[in-house]
Image: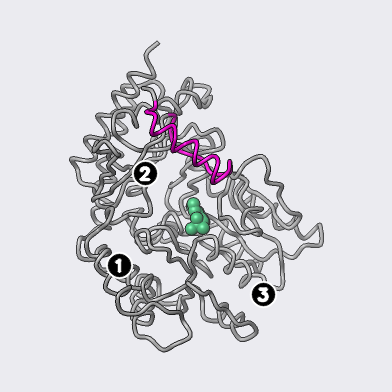
Amino acid sequence: ERLSAHERSLIERRERLLGPAYRLFYERPLHTVRGEGVWLFDDQGRRYLDAYNNVASVGHCHPRVVSAISRQAAQLNTHTRYLQEGILDYAEQLLGTFPDYLERVMFTCTGSEANDLALRIARHHTGGTGVIITRFAYHGVTGDLAELSPSLGAGIRLPAHARTVLAPDAYRLGADQVAATLAADVRAAIDDLRAQGIRPAALLLDGIFSSDGVFPGPAGFLAEAVALAQAEGLLYIADEVQSGFARTGDAFWGFERHGVRPDLVTLGKPMGNGQPIAGLVGRAEVVDGFGRNLRYFNTFGGNPVSCAAGQAVLDVIRDEELQARARETGRYLLQGLGRLQQRHALIGDVRGAGLFLGVELVKDRASQAPAAAETRRVVNAMRERGVLISAAGPLENILKIRPLLAFEREHADLLLETLDAALDEVGAP
Ligand code: PMP
């Protein structure tokens, strides 16, 4: 379908005002004006099922979050250099969602800042600079983190202190090879850094390897690589910006599925349901060493309005039992995707943990050749049919399905029916 004159003018103004670094989703960009629950609405009043948003995770404009934000905004919004209860109550409850050995929390505004701070802390603690990441990682937009985010584009050149390891791709490696391959790669990366005279500081991994192509399992595959890195004196930074806050269903935090003990955990995206709040949680010994030598002040980080939003999000996840919902709806979706795999030759693999799912499209199952163009067409066909998803992986041939935690079975059914139809449309010879 063609763009309206108004849509064309919005696109033209964006390009003129914002410049070309911003990218719109979809061949026909979506003009959103309102969100409610699992739905987004365009300017014509048409609704779209949001199966992609990992920020408004408890539901677009959730009334409890909205009222917590507006109440606090009407009362006080300052910074962390005055005594206040809100930040402490929230810190206690947030820490309560982690294993006991993680005792400190620090607040930032974005996931990038959280990773940036975690890296600074890890370097301070270890005296090293080297960082190990996956080959198509995304960790953020600061100078340090963008260099450690090869998925940003061909313009990224890895710094001398970085080493990459293969993503834990169970589909191509075979489920039984993932753990050992990752551990061997980490071993080689550590050895190579040392051979170049670079002391390794951190193993930095996304808990679900989202930009690499969504690799949730088999659960436990991280354990060997993490244990090895920690034994070698590296800190393990679990980037939970995508996989945190009950998303993976079986656990509140993605790393818990792997039975590992991160030294630092970074948080963001769904933390305030859209209000900018992010941060890190870490071992006291690690966080305190940094804090004894350096002051940290983040003007907006941990402000009372953001903490009120964060508190409301935790309350809603608990009261609406969203972790159990993510587990059950996720399992239901995965089964449904498995049925679609039997009907559609394009689907090479379906995988997921809770409400974080990947559907890998291939040209044929024997060669596993990525079907990138088809994936793009499916994503756009879904959008035309009113369901929002996206694609991940170096070749963008993995449908990335990441619904709101507020998803119900009826929404899962609508998603599956729509995907079935979109695959019929795209897969037809
Ligand atoms: N880490 C991961 C795994 C992410 O997905 C993102 C955001 N896409 C970030 C870090 C950076 O978060 P932010 O955009 O809030 O800076």
Report the residue at 49% width, 75% height from top.
Answer: 106
Helix, strand or loop at mark 1: helix
| Residue at mark 3 to residue at mark 2: CA–CA distance | 36 Å
Q: CA distance from mark 2 to mark 1?
A: 20 Å
Image coordinates of residue 97 in percent, x first then y, are 35, 70
Q: Closer to us: mark 3 or mark 2? A: 2
> Over which residues does the magenta segment extend?
3-27
- Residue 212's spot in the image, x, y percent? 53, 43
Residue in view at x 60 percent, y 67 percent: 235
Q: Which label's residue is closer to the chain start, 3 or 2?
A: 2
Q: Is residue 71 placed above or below 339 in the rendered structure?
A: below
Q: Quadrant of residue 125?
A: bottom right
Please tell me whether mark 3 or mark 1 is closer to you in this view. Answer: 1
Between 412 and 100, the one nearer to me in the picture: 412
Q: Is residue 194 above or below residue 122?
A: above
- The residue at which mark 1 appears reads as 314
Mark 2, ligand 1, within 8 Å: the answer is: no
Residue 96: within the magenta? no
Disc 3, SS: helix
Disc 3 to disc 1, how far (Cα)? 31 Å
Q: Which mark is residue 124?
A: 3
Kindly tell me whether residue 222 is visible in this rendering: no
According to the picture, the residue beneath numbered tag 2 turns out to be 52
